């Protein structure tokens, strides 16, 4: 697995140096802290996480209308390495796709930038019943990861070389595909360099959008089917498939945003396994039930970027067979539209800091 990650890194770097003047590379080192979001995390606090990120970034100039709406963001790829300085947690290798969003006028050399990235990560020392039973953060080697970075960047400080510094937040977990799965969150200070791949500094010509600022769309109805596998909080209880059927309406407020309201059915066989195992534990106080499906109602927001959109939703179970992680849940999803109707999605569902599922699905917006 390490060889695969290193291979991807060198492949991306090769792409970088073959690109046009609209690209740049960035390298950062970081030093930070693990966030103790539950009592188990205190076992991991053996040192301060360190590591680095290397990224390739492609600038946009307004070739598409949506780019002006977001102040001409960058799109790129990142490779990350984290050393938790913990014998329990080991190390983390990760790859991401990311966007950089600029706060200031894009023609300025000094910029404040927010980066959001999502990808996959490989942990070198996951949970093992016999050799590493304290690692309740990573139940498997393969994990999902997201990272956010707020940083200052100065370009062309010395010819093509610039500097950057800021704060970053990194989350990694397997989204409860296999228990245990408390995950690890870190925040850190970053410091690094950026290098413009153009041969010399060029004047920037941004293309203004010609689309109308006025935008109106009727209420749309969405239907989605999602699924995946997950395991109950009891380690070794078994990985089970699950299914989600969602129906909701959305109303576009403008070209960027829409609000949502809807309901969804969760069919989760792992709940039945969790229930039956708990009945064997003395003094368990679960109410009697023979139904293990849940129904949630939710409100949400969808942020449209280009063919990709980001969904955030807050839900409440109106059908809730027994206590499991709480009735309130939240989801964070990424959608890819193929045309005006059909889309594919990946979505993380959690109860506060506890991830329950990562869901893959398809849907239609009518």
Image (cartoon, rainbow, N blue to C red):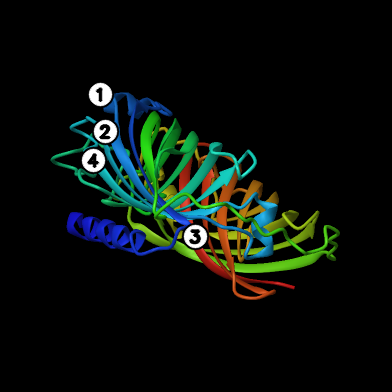
Q: Earlier in the sequence, mark 4 or mark 2?
A: 2
> Alpha-carbon distance for marks 1 and 4?
13 Å
Which residue lies under the disc numbered 3? 359
Which comes sooner in the sequence, label 1 or label 4? 1
Q: Secondary structure at mark 3?
A: strand
Q: Are marks 1 and 2 in contact (CB under 8 Å)?
A: yes
Q: Residue at x 57, y 46 (%)?
A: 101
What is the spatial separation of the Cα atoms under label 3 and label 1, in whole angstroms? 34 Å
**Image check: 134 left or right of 210?**
left
- The image quarter containing residue 133 is top left
Between the C-alphas of marks 3 and 4, the distance is 26 Å
Q: Secondary structure at mark 2?
A: loop
Rendered image: mark on residue 47 = 1
The local secondary structure at tag 1 comes to: loop
> Sequence order check: which comes first, mark 2 or mark 3?
2
Any mark on residue 147, and which?
none
Q: Give percent across and percent down for residue 34.
A: 36, 28
């Amino acid at each position: 697995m390490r060889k695969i990650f290193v291979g991807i890194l060198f492949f991306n770097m090769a792409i970088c140096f073959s690109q046009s003047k609209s690209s740049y590379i960035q390298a950062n080192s970081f030093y930070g802290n693990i966030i103790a979001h539950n009592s188990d995390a205190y076992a991991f606090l053996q040192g301060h996480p360190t590591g680095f990120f290397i990224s390739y970034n492609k600038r946009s100039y307004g070739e598409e209308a949506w780019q002006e709406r977001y102040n001409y963001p960058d799109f790129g790829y990142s490779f990350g390495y984290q050393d938790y300085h913990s014998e329990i947690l080991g190390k983390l290798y990760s790859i991401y796709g990311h966007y950089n969003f600029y706060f200031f006028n894009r023609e300025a050399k000094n910029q404040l930038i927010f980066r959001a990235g999502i990808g996959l990560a490989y942990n070198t020392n996951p949970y093992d019943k016999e050799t590493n039973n304290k690692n309740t953060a990573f139940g498997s080697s393969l994990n999902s990861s997201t990272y956010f970075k707020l940083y200052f960047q100065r370009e062309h400080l010395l010819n093509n070389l610039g500097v950057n510094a800021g704060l970053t937040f990194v989350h990694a977990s397997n989204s409860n595909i296999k228990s245990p799965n408390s995950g690890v969150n870190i925040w850190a200070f970053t410091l690094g360099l950026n290098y413009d791949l153009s041969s010399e500094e060029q004047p920037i010509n941004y293309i203004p959008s010609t689309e109308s600022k006025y935008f109106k769309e009727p209420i749309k109805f969405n239907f989605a089917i999602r699924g995946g596998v997950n395991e109950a909080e009891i380690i070794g209880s078994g990985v089970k498939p699950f299914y989600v059927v969602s129906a909701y309406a959305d109303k576009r407020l403008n070209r960027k945003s829409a609000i949502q309201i809807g309901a969804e059915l969760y069919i989760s066989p792992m709940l039945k396994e969790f229930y039956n195992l708990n009945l064997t534990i003395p003094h368990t106080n679960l109410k009697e039930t023979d139904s293990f499906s849940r129904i949630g109602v939710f409100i949400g927001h969808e942020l449209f970027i280009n063919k990709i959109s980001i969904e955030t939703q807050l839900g409440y179970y109106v059908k809730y067979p027994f206590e499991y992680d709480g009735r309130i849940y939240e989801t964070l999803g990424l959608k890819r539209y193929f045309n005006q109707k059909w889309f594919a999605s990946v979505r993380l569902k959690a109860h506060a800091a506890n991830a329950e599922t990562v869901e893959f699905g398809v849907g239609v917006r009518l």
